[in-house]
Image (cartoon, rainbow, N blue to C red):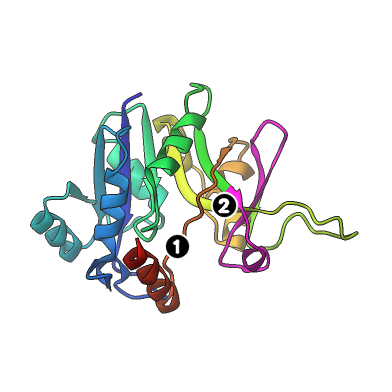
Amino acid sequence: MKVIAVIPARLASTRLPRKMLRECAGQPLLAHVYRAVRSSELLNDVVIATDAEEILECCKKNGWHARMTSADHRSGTERVCEIAHSMTADVYLNLQGDEPLTRAEHIQSLLEVMTDPAVQVGTLKTSASAADVNNPNAVKVVTDSSGKALYFSRAAIPFDRDGIRPVYFKHLGLYAYRKAALDQFMKLPESVLERSERLEQLRFLENGIPIHVGETQFDTIGVDTEEDLRRVEKMLMTR
């Protein structure tokens, strides 16, 4: 497969303003993400997709492949779709710009999901820690016996009514798409579930488009707050 990894990066984050360029362990957060994605040997190209001139200039200064995309995009998926219309590949990865703990193993697991040409959308899950089960910032996922997602939620799913202690899985916000799935996503209106949970992947499920979920043993920490940034910084410096 020809695979292009896209790292959506914007400055207009609300909970942690300018987080892509915030210093973390002596470098911009985006530098750690780009280096982590580049560690995979399975990618034909890695592109930072941004709508900010300041990020574009940072990329040029460091020799990172970057492209300007529309400021009207409401999600990373929409930004990846724009890249897919200018760069040809079999599979496009959406690797979040606020996931500095992304590993080559994540990318390998994600691409294993896509080896079946019938799979249009893939993502990853990992066992949820006790602290993440009831944490609304840690998205949970339940799947059927074939590994297809049944639902994603910020709530603790499944609900443990009788105390049987089910295994909870945390969803990792790393995605793989074929171009047809991206084009279909763009044609669909924002769904009710998507709007309720603020989870864009629910647009696929609510419109009958399966999401196949691979499993990984490696958790990540998405940087959304100042606390997240400092926590990740300690981990990166330990590495």
The type of residue carrying mark 1 is Gly
Q: Residues within 10 Å of mark 1 (few under 14, many from 20)?
A: many
| Residue 56 appears in the rendering | yes
Q: Which residue is mark 2?
A: 171
Location of residue 115 in the rendering, given as x and y in whole percent from the top left corner:
47, 24
Residues rendered magenta in the picture: 126-151
Q: Is residue 3 above or below residue 58?
A: above
Residue at the extreme top: 117
The type of residue carrying mark 2 is His
Disc number at residue 51? none
Location of residue 101 in the rendering, given as x and y in whole percent from the top left corner:
39, 56
Inspect the magenta stretch and tell me whether residue 174 lies in it: no
Location of residue 147 in the rendering, given as x and y in whole percent from the top left corner:
64, 35
Disc number at residue 222? 1
Residue 81 sits in quarter: top left
Q: Is residue 177 above or below residue 202?
A: above
- Is 66 displayed left or right of 213 in the figure? left
Instruction: Tell me which residue sits at (31%, 26%) in the image.
Output: 2
